[in-house]
Amino acid sequence: MRKILVTGGAGFIGSNFVHYMLRKYDDVMLMVLDALTYAGNLDNLKPIWDEERFMFLHGDIRDNALVTDLMRNAEYVVHFAAETHVDRSIHDAGVFIETDVFGTFILLEAARNADIKRFVHISTDEVYGEAPGRPSLETDALMPKSPYAASKAGADRLAFSYFTTYGLPVVISRCSNNYGPYQYPEKLIPLFVTNALENKPLPVYGTGKSSRDWIYVLDHCRAIDALLSAEAVEGEAFNIGAANELDVLQITDIILTQLKKPNSLIKHVDDRLGHVVRHAVNTNKIKSAIGWEPQYDFAENMESTIKWYIENEDWWRKVKEKGEEYKAWVDRQYRGLD
């Protein structure tokens, strides 16, 4: 039985990874550690709550005693836990440094003193900053443009240093923008889908021409799964993406068309500070090294993602209508939009 510690496993990508691994394997035991801050949601784990190969622990990755104890019982670590939203980092950078950098340090330090076979650190393509001329390569300089991206770049390089200094078997993934079920509705796709369902404005930053490479969350999970067991990848960073670049207005059009909602719901707002115009990654390295390629079709899974939010209204309404933190954030970020 493989024992895997999953940090941030009640969040969007983390919970999808937990579901994926339990569906695919009979020989895994998943220990999920999550602080259940605003984006951590136990409802994301409800379908597998009674699964005997799953255990949930409410706690903070900055808690050294807790992390050290858990690490002794793990063989593998998949580290998702982080503050993740660019907009929030602009208003409150400190918590991003505390969680994303210091929290990662606590995990790495505990891991080097335990018998960990592989530590997969989940980074992001945000660490590169702009990709103006071509998709970013793993060898490109890290030029983060937001406090969030900078905190992830710091954690990314800290993880690498634990490989070079202590020989900790670290692998780093840098993925492009994920979409799929269970995504907290402050992010573009769930925010726009749920706002459109409520006939509320869809706030588009600036011209709406900022583009991202969009990847279905289960393709990301497949890549992480492969990196857990791949040979001769310790100390390496791997880009993960789907070569599917679309800008905000294109994503918005897909959502409004599927929901049969008018373009009048689009409301342009002041552009985000330090807004990256283009994120995109070159994935030749991971394809060559371990044979991973994206499998999920964008159009088909974008449709199924929108359908998921339609069919799981109770899930997102609990967040948007009953979550005081969410309402306070929307009021601050999009004041006067309604």
Image: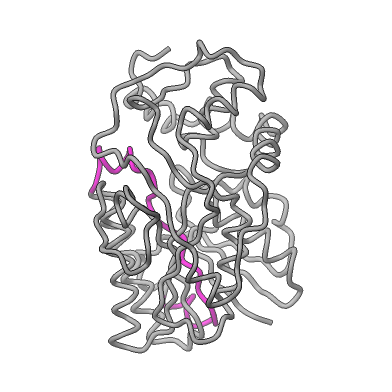
Point out the residue furthest to the front here.
133
Relative side of 43 to 166, left or right: right
In percent of width and height, residue 95 lies at 28, 50
Which of the 4 image quadrants contains residue 103?
Answer: bottom left
Relative side of 321 to 303, left or right: left
Residue drawn at (32%, 88%), measured in percent from left and top? Answer: 166
Query: Relative to residue 316, is residue 338 depicted above or below?
Result: above
State the quadrant of the N terminus: bottom right
Q: Nearer the viewer, residue 315 or 275?
A: 275
Residue drawn at (47%, 37%), measured in percent from left and top? Answer: 187
Relative side of 4 to 64, left or right: right
Span of residues in magenta: 68-93
In percent of width and height, residue 97 lies at 26, 56
Query: Relative to residue 275, is residue 269 depicted above or below?
Result: above
Q: Nearer the viewer, residue 117 or 276?
A: 276
Q: Is residue 87 magenta?
A: yes
In percent of width and height, residue 77 lies at 50, 74
Q: Is residue 243 magenta?
A: no
Q: Identify the image's colour scheme: rainbow, by chain, secondary structure or one colour.
A: one colour
Which of the 4 image quadrants contains residue 174?
Answer: bottom left
Query: Relative to residue 124, is residue 195 depicted above or below?
Result: above
Which of the 4 image quadrants contains residue 167?
Answer: bottom left
Residue drawn at (61%, 20%), measured in percent from left and top? Answer: 197
